[in-house]
Amino acid sequence: MQPPNVVDHSSDRIRIAVDAMGGDFAPANEVQGAGNALKRTNNRFDVVLVGDRTAIEKELASLDAAGLSISIVHAPTVVTMHDSPVAALKQKPDSSLVVGMTLHKERKVDAFVSTSNTGAVTAASTLLLGRIPGVSRPTIGTLFPSDTGYALIADAGAVTDSKPHFLFEFGVMGSIFSEYILGKKNPRVGLLNVGEEESKGDERTKEAYKLFIQRADAVNFIGNIEGRDILKGKADVVVCDGFLGNVLLKFGESVPSFLKAKFKAYADRGIYQKLLMALLRNPLRKIFKDFDYQEYGGVPLLGVNGVTIIGHGRSTPKAIANMILRAEEMVQKKINTHIENTLRELQ
């Protein structure tokens, strides 16, 4: 069986590689998500599914894939969540992660989407794609709902021992993403700290604060912010070390399930409570939608010389479709070019 609709990569269409074997439910969710993204956009771009050809073709056979701009690149092995990130790149060169990232490195595709081991995706992106000139370390940006729309947290786990100038660069890259992707004009950048005063925090955050003040022309820096300010929407970009950012990310992911359990327990108290919760079902559903990772799909790895979107291992087809659309948007809006130009001007 030949892959359906093999894509002509000599065209000017945007090409997005999808790690079809990375997630917990691969390749079913990846294939369905890719199909959904193409159907929603009327085949606006090309998708390259990277992974075990037989398994992918089986999923495509169960999907109405006729006419979709999908091709397959065979990669027989898989990087698992238990693999050491750097070791996996050396020991599994024929994995869907490494083969897909190599396609991006060789500019055969314009972006790479994966729900595989976050550490391995980050390592592969950094080592194979390299960094944008002027970037010391890439940053994972994750989205938090707030009173003023989504706030970008940078870093959310790429660098757990950040230096002050790393934090400054995170703020610059996050500001560019917030402006061009989230539509925030002159986005407000806040440095996450234990207090708002300039004197608060450890030496790293104090030095980072000074850098932001010294380069006030780079971003709209509003000073230190506290954890309680994030959901209030005080800042559009929240800058922090990757250790703290990852703790925030995992805590935020636990909030919806915790609240749903509380509401269910309340409804189980009696008929009055059950009726009340039934009346509130639609408003609550809209509120929880803001916390649903599926709505934005995945998170960008900013600072690498390419476009990488990283998703949850448990990503649904909806989440994967949105990851693919986010990748397309980052390519279209030339986020990396804006980052490189801005950092060059700051040198």
Image: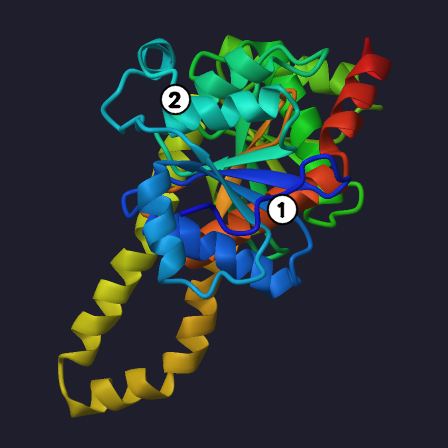
Residue count near mark 1 (Cα–Cα under 10 Å), binned few <14, some 14–19, many ≥20: many
Q: Nearer the viewer, residue 209 or 184?
A: 184
Residue 318 position in % (x across, y down): 45, 59
Q: Is residue 187 left or right of residue 15?
A: right
Q: Is residue 7 left or right of residue 21?
A: right
**Residue drawn where x is 53% and y is 47% of the image:** 323
Q: CA distance from mark 1 to mark 2?
A: 25 Å
- Quadrant of residue 171 in the image? top right
Element type where label 2 sits in the image: helix
Q: Nearer the viewer, residue 130 or 341?
A: 130
Badge 2 amino acid: Ala
Q: Which of the two discs, 1 and 2, labels the residue nearer the N terminus?
A: 1
Do the numbered discs 1 and 2 sit on residues whose CB atoms are within 8 Å?
A: no
Instruction: Indicate how the structure is coloured in the image.
Output: rainbow
**Residue drawn where x is 37% and y is 39% of the image:** 53
Residue 287 position in % (x across, y down): 46, 67
Q: Is residue 193 visible?
A: no
Q: Residue furthest front?
A: 1
Q: Residue furthest left?
A: 269
Residue behind mark 2: 120
Badge 1 amino acid: Asp
Q: Would you place residue 255 above or below residue 187 in this image?
A: below
Residue count near mark 2 (Cα–Cα under 10 Å), binned few <14, some 14–19, many ≥20: many
Q: Quadrant of the C terminus?
A: top right
Element type where label 1 sits in the image: strand
Q: Nearer the viewer, residue 24 or 301?
A: 24
- Quadrant of residue 117 in the image? top left
Residue behind mark 1: 46
Residue 44 position in % (x across, y down): 69, 55
Q: Is residue 243 left or right of residue 128?
A: left
Q: Would you place residue 153 above or below residue 151 in this image?
A: above
- Quadrant of residue 224 in the image? top right
